[in-house]
Image (tube, rainbow, N blue to C red):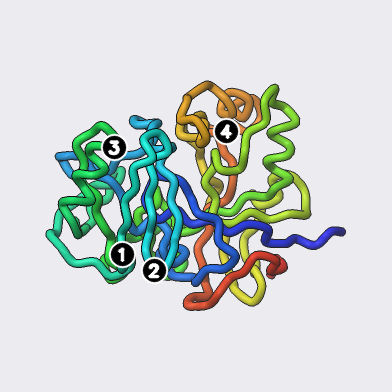
Amino acid sequence: MPKLILSEIWIYPIKSLAGIRVKQANLKQKGLEGDRRWMLIDETGRFITQRENPNLALFDLNFDHGGLHITNRTTQQKLLIQDVSNQMGKEYTATIWDDEVKVIEPSVSYSNWFSEQAGIPCKLVFFPEANTRNIDPKYANSHEQVSLADGYPYLIIGQSSLNDLNSRLDLPVTMQRFRPNFVFTGGEAFEEDRWQHFKIGTNSFRGVKRCARCVLTTINPQTGEQGREPLFTLSKYRKEENKIFFGQNVIALSLENLISEGDEITME
């Protein structure tokens, strides 16, 4: 039986913008270090995503020399955020689904840049590591926290699961439609659905629930265009109780450790 190997690690520094593939990352309770500690909010404090603004897919991000570089692929305008994980500024209350969180707007100039480039009035806000946001208590192991992700700190998907989906599509899609933190090779399609306790390298994790997918997966991350796939095809064989599932939400039981591409995955 082929080994299960962690093949890709992704972080998404700003919620609903493009991800950054990294070779290794530090495990935090709220998610990988640097993952979704920032987001855009509207004038009422509500979170902004590609669901309503598909053009957010066209902002590319990368880390360089301690700063976060953001580029609008359409205009080629750039923004640099320095000291990414240590921000001060004006505090606001923001909402993500049913959660209220305390966030900080470090710079009005950052917010103005995004308002102009995205074409919507918005603020760029930061979620300090010390601030609180609990995951759904019925899935918690020990009062786990999450950053600004939709609900859970980690998401894992097998390459075999994507291959199975692409075998059913006229035009294949990339894994970035599904915004995982961890991608692995080896094993059967959708076997991650059944994972409960497992290790990646020496780090322990627990699968808590399958991930229900939304229209964000129908937005092409390269073009920002929206269609009906892959949700339409997934609905034919991955739909239960009116939800379409792809990937497994996960919490980390090991913290402050490094995780690296090439780590072996084993069941506990």
Amino acid, disc 4: Glu
Choose mark 4 or mark 3, whichever is in front.
Answer: 3
Q: Pick the residue in front: 264 or 108.
A: 108
Give the residue displayed 70% in from the left and 47% down from the top.
159
Q: Nearer the viewer, residue 171 or 132?
A: 171
Rendering coords of residue 227 (x, y %): 51, 22
Q: Nearer the viewer, mark 2 or mark 4?
A: 2
Q: Pick whichever of labels 2 and 3 is earlier in the sequence.
A: 2
Query: Can residue 136 be seen in this snapshot?
Result: no
Tell me the element at label 4: strand
Mark 1 sits on what residue? 82
Q: Residue 166 at what x, y percent from top left?
A: 70, 33
Side of 107 where 117 appears, left or right:
right
Q: Are marks 1 and 2 in contact (CB under 8 Å)?
A: yes
Q: Residue furthest left?
A: 90
* Number of other residues with Cα within 10 Å of mark 1, as a class: few under 14, some 14 to 19, many 20 or more: some
Image side of residue 125 versus residue 252, left or right: left
> In this rendering, would 116 be left or right of 171?
left
Q: Nearer the viewer, mark 1 or mark 4?
A: 1
Q: Earlier in the sequence, mark 4 or mark 3?
A: 3
The image's mark for residue 183 is: none
**What amino acid type should be assigned to the residue bearing mark 1?**
Gln
Question: What label does residue 240 carry, if any?
Answer: 4
User: Is any atom of residue 196 visible in this view?
Assistant: yes
Disc assigned to residue 117: 3
| Residue farthest toward the right in the current orientation of the protein | 1
> What's the CA distance linking mark 3 and mark 1?
19 Å
